[in-house]
Image: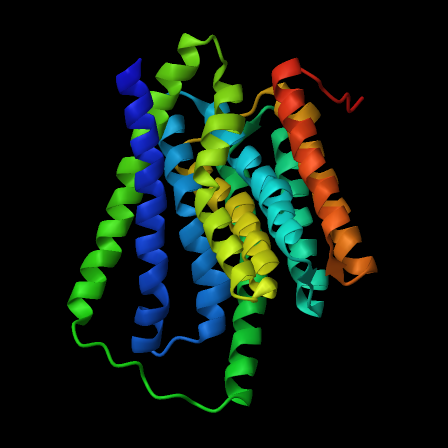
Amino acid sequence: MILFILLFILGIIFLWLGTNAVLRRVPVLAGWLRVSPLIVTVLLLAVMTSLPEFFVSLFASLRGQPSAAVGNIVGSNFVTLTFVAGICALWRPIEVGPTLRTRESSWMILGAALLLIFAMDGVISRIDGILLLAAYIPYFLGTLDDARRQRNRETKNSVTAIKRPWLEVIIFAGGLGMIVLGSSWVVENGTALARMFGMSDLLIGVTFYAFGTSLPELAIALGAVLKHQANVTLGEIYASNIFTGLAVVGALCLIKPLVVEPIIVQRDLPMLIVAGVLLQMFITTGRRFVRLEAIVMIAIYALFLAAQFMGFSISLD
C-alpha cells in the first residue's frame, strides 16, 4: 500500500513537472518559429494543460475503465471551472474582458451541453467523437482569426534568438514523456489504492484523477493572478475546458468509444453546465469575478464532491 501511495504521488509530481517543462518552452519555441503570442496563450497553452487529462483518460479507457476516463474529464473540467477559478478570484478579484464574456464562456457551455446530449444513449461513439472535433474547429478558427488581426495591429518584433534550440526541443519532448509516464502511474496506482477502499471507477475518475490532472491549470492560473495577469486566468481555464470537452473527448472516442454511466448524465454533466452558466452570469453582470462569487463557486465544488460520495443524483425525466 505504501508503494502504491508513493508511486501515485510521484505520478502527480511527474505530471506537474512535465507540464511545467512543456509550458516554459512553448513561448520560447513560439517566438523562434514566429508564432503569434496570442496563439501560444489561448490555443497552445490550453492544449498543453489538457495533456494530463488526455493521457490519464486514454490509459484508463485502454485498461477497461471507461467510467474513470469520462469521470476524469468531467471532474477535471468541474475542478478548474469552480475550485481553480474560485481560488484565484479569492486571492484577487478578476477583471473580465469582453472576449471572455462572450466567446469563451459560451463555447465552454456549448461543449458541456454537447457532451450531455451525446452521452444520453450511454455511449459516446466514434461518430459523436467526429462531431465533437468538428465543433472545435470554428472556435479554433475564430481564435486564430483574432490572433491574426491583433498581430497586424501590433509592431512586428524580431525573432527570439535561441542559442541551443535543439536543447529546448529535447526538454520539450522530455516534458511530454514525463506527462505520459506520470499519467500511467496515476492510473495504475490510483486505481489500486481506490479499489482497496472499495471505490468505483467513476468515483476514482471524478476525484483522484480529476484533481491530479487539474494541477497544471491551478499552477498557471495562480501564477497569472500573482503576476497581475488576471485575464489570462479565466482565459486559460475556459480554453482548456473547451479543448478538453470537445477535442480531447473527440480524440478519445476515435481511439475507443466511451461508455458513459447513467449517473454522469443524471448528475455530473448537468452540474457542470449549471456551474458554467452561473460563472457566466457572474462575469457578465458585474464584468468582474469577485471574492463573494468565488466563495459560491468553491461551495459548488464542495457540493459536487459531496454528491460523489453520497450518491446524490438529478432526474432528467
Q: Going by the image, does 175 lie left or right of 16? A: left
Q: Where is the C terminus found, in terms of image quarters? A: top right
Q: Position of residue 201 (x, y in %)?
A: 48, 18
Q: Position of residue 214 (x, y in %)?
A: 48, 41
Residue in the foreground of this view, choosing between 310 and 72: 310
Camera sees residue 31: yes
Residue in the foreground of this view, choosing between 122 and 268: 268
Give above or below for 261 relative to 252.
above
Residue in the foreground of this view, choosing between 68 and 289: 289
Q: Position of residue 195 (x, y in %)?
A: 42, 11
Q: Position of residue 46 (x, y in %)?
A: 48, 55
Residue in the foreground of this view, choosing between 29 and 129: 29
Residue in view at x 37 percent, y 69 percent? 27
Rendering quarter of residue 265: top right
Give above or below for 56 relative to 96.
above
Residue in view at x 60 percent, y 63 percent? 230
Q: How is the image coloured?
A: rainbow
Q: How many marks?
A: 0
Q: Where is the N terminus found, in terms of image quarters? A: top left
* In the image, farthest residue toward the bottom: 155
Residue in view at x 30 percent, y 29 percent? 185
Q: Going by the image, does 39 lie left or right of 285? A: left
Residue in view at x 40 percent, y 42 percent? 52
Q: Going by the image, does 314 lie left or right of 8? A: right
